DNA sequence: GGTTTACTTGAACAATTGTTCAGGTAACAA
DNA sequence: TTGTTACCTGAACAATTGTTCAAGTAAACC
């Protein structure tokens, strides 16, 4: 992957993240990079293929951040810091508080089969990252082992999705801190009987 | 509002809900209703105005369901039933598991100022419904009063958003039941110090 | 020097979009 | 009957979309 291709991917990620898939035109991408259509199509076969690569890049990075969190020693503290970092993106990059993949899910019907597949794979990839974290927490004796790591991981991802929406909409960040605190209590709290 | 206009609104709601705002063309609406453009534009000034009405209709109905829930005597049971009903929409209407408004939020940048405003208002409207429910729960002594009803309502709405995404993606519904059980424990569980 | 390779340009295409409009129809009031 | 109102038809519009392509450029390799 050449330097230029990486630059294209980065700028395209910004656009797709901020505006969505359909709302981002190839001309938007061209303008942001000062490129002509032919140059862009020489590297990426089309809009859909470009989006697939953006999705994969995004999921790989997010999972990497989760794996990094799972390697720390103070796991609960690390978990809290991970959430804070993701949820409290500064005002200049507020759009990043929403999840690119969840945004894409809302437009799933207008994605080609390949992009829809890539989207599903990306969400599964991230779930794996959460599972690693949950397993680490269980091994360290920080949370219950009476519920399977996969199920807790899905629960955690669900919390994460809800919180990202909330963080995007929220007027001030105090409520977000409060919700993170609540989550830290809940994950250590009581769990229902496993189904 | 005439009978025909209501029919238009219903069909348009289905389309916008299932496919999203941009992905739904006025021709889609026309085809679904076997109408010609002029007939449609005689009743609704344009696509954006149609979407505004769909949003308002959607929010009004959802809030009404919350108010109804708040009127029951067994409030915790009613809350659980509300969640089950919303989250476990049958396979034929699976798209309804996602929230129309949250989907619309992902396309916010491509909405006109009027539609964006309507979207914000709709979300506020629903939050009011949650606040009513939480206040009722507090008055009945079912949950803590040490946290303001508004904050718990926002928390509950956050949970609801995450769960709807999860319910849409989930392969089987057992995990969803488990998450609802977990939510019912958490809402009665420990809460952080209020900010 | 000659040839290939990779990249660029800028115009153009076909399809789809939201919307408009001149003219038609049918019911109802005066 | 006459006029009004409300709705409808079907073709057409201008703009935007993703994408293609013939032609040019410039560095790399023989």
Image (cartoon, coloured by chain):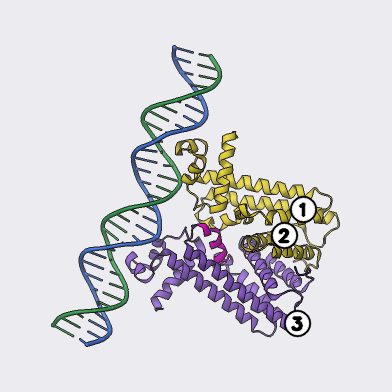
Chain colours: A purple, B yellow, C green, D blue
A2 in relation to A186, above or below = below
- Discs 1 and 2 carry the same chain letter: yes
Q: Which residue is mark 3?
A: A141
Q: Which residue is mark 1?
A: B133
Q: Cα distance, mark 3 to mark 2?
A: 29 Å
Which residue appears at 53% of the width and 56% of the height? B107
Query: What secondary structure is marked by label 2?
Result: helix
Nearer the observer, disc 3 or disc 2?
3
Q: Relative to residue B135, is residue A135 drawn left or right?
A: left
Residue B115 is inside the magenta segment: no
Residue A102 is inside the magenta segment: yes
Mark 3 — on which chain does it sit?
Answer: A
Magenta stretch, overall SS: helix
Mark 2 — on which chain does it sit?
Answer: B
Name the N-terminal-most of marks 1 and 2.
1
- Discs 3 and 2 carry the same chain letter: no
What percent of the width, then of the height, locates residue B161?
A: 66, 60
Which residue appears at 72% of the width and 80% of the height? A138
Q: Nearer the viewer, residue B72 or B18?
A: B18
Query: What secondary structure is marked by label 3?
Result: loop
Mark 1 — on which chain does it sit?
Answer: B
What percent of the width, then of the height, locates residue A28?
A: 41, 62
| First to last magenta residue range | A99-109
Which residue appears at 46% of the width and 38% of the height? B36
Q: Are marks 3 and 2 in contact (CB under 8 Å)?
A: no
Q: Are marks 1 and 2 in contact (CB under 8 Å)?
A: yes
Q: Which mark is residue B156?
A: 2
What is the quadrant of the C terminus of chain B in the image? bottom right
């Amino acid at each position: 992957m050449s330097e230029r291709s990486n630059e294209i991917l980065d700028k395209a990620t910004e656009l797709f993240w901020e505006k969505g898939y359909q709302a981002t035109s190839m001309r938007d991408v061209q303008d942001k990079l000062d490129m002509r259509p032919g140059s862009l199509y020489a590297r990426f076969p089309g809009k859909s293929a470009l989006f697939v690569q953006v999705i994969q890049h995004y999921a790989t990075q997010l999972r990497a951040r989760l794996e990094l969190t799972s390697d720390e020693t103070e796991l609960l503290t690390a978990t809290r810091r991970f959430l804070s970092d993701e949820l409290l993106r500064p005002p200049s990059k507020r759009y990043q508080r929403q999840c690119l993949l969840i945004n894409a899910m809302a437009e799933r019907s207008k994605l080609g089969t390949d992009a829809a597949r890539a989207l599903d794979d990306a969400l599964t990839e991230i779930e794996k990252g959460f599972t690693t974290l949950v397993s680490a927490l269980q091994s360290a004796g920080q949370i219950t082992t009476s519920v399977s790591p996969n199920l807790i991981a899905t629960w955690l991802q669900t919390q994460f999705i809800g919180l990202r929406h909330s963080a995007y909409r929220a007027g001030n960040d105090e409520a977000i801190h409060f919700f993170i605190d609540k989550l830290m209590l809940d994950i250590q709290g009581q769990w229902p009987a496993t189904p």
